[in-house]
Structure formats: structure tokens, C-alpha cells
Image (cartoon, helix red, strand yellow):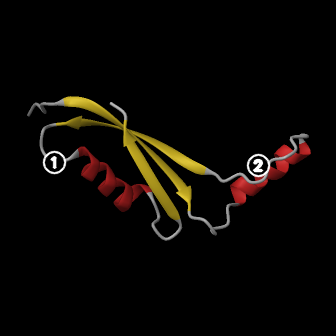
Amino acid sequence: MKTEGKDRLAVVYVKLKDGVLDPQGSTIERALDQMGYQGIKEIRSGKIFEITFRENGGGKPEELIDEICRKLLTNPVIENFNFEIVK
């Protein structure tokens, strides 16, 4: 069965909530200090996902991406996310 519609691209940004310890960010922060980069106050790590999907006229793309983020891509206890549909 052929799926009609055009390809769309969503970019999802995931980061730890404020107050959640970020060992990876702390490690990078220490490494930068050791490399001589001064004045770095804090580094927080995160993830970026690019999701290419086929828009087929049914449902809203924002609802699809939001559901994917909530059900699979993030841990709502410790992470926040936002996204943009770029094409």
C-alpha cells in the first residue's frame, strides 16, 4: 500500500531538568578547564533527534512528535524536551 504525503523533518531537543546531576556535562567542564578554557560557568549535556516522517493528511504532526517524545525519547522524571518541525 502506497503512503501519500510529503516528507517532513522534526528536530527534537532533550536535556536534563534543572537540578538533575549531569556527570557528562561536569566531566566536559573539568576537561575544558584543564585545557585552559577559562570562564566556562556550566555545561549541560543533551540529545538531539532528527525524525523524518511522512505527512499523510491525517492528524497533526505536532501531536505525533509530542507523543513519540513522551512515550519513547525522553524520561519525563529527569528530562525536558522541545521540538520544531523544520520542513
Mark 2 to mark 1 CA distance (whole Å): 41 Å
Q: Nearer the viewer, residue 19 or 71?
A: 19
Q: Where is residue 75? Give x, y as percent.
A: 47, 64
Q: Give me the residue at 84% from left, 46% from top.
A: 39
Q: Is residue 24 left or right of residue 4?
A: right
Specify the farthest residue to the left.
1
Q: Relative to 60, is 17 above or below? A: below
Q: Is residue 7 left or right of residue 43?
A: left
Three-letter code, disc 2: Ile
Instruction: Characterize the local packing of mark 2: few (<14), some (14-19) or many (20 or more) Cα atoms within 10 angstroms.
Output: some
Q: Is residue 60 left or right of residue 22?
A: left
Residue carrying label 1: 59
Report which quarter residue 84 is drawn in.
top left
Q: Nearer the viewer, residue 18 or 65?
A: 18
Residue carrying label 2: 28
Q: Give me the residue at 67% from left, 61% from top.
A: 22
Q: Is residue 70 left or right of residue 75?
A: left
The first of marks 2 and 1 along the sequence is 2
Q: Give me the residue at 83% from left, 44% from top.
A: 32
Q: Give me the residue at 32% from left, 54% from top.
A: 66
Q: Where is residue 35? Give x, y as percent.
A: 89, 40
Which quadrant does the C terminus fall into? top left
Q: Where is residue 12? Give x, y as percent.
A: 43, 46
Three-letter code, disc 1: Gly
**Quick one: SS at disc 1?**
loop
**Quick one: SS at disc 2?**
helix
Which quadrant does the N terminus fall into? top left
Q: Nearer the viewer, residue 55 or 82?
A: 82
Q: Relative to 6, is 68 above or below? A: below
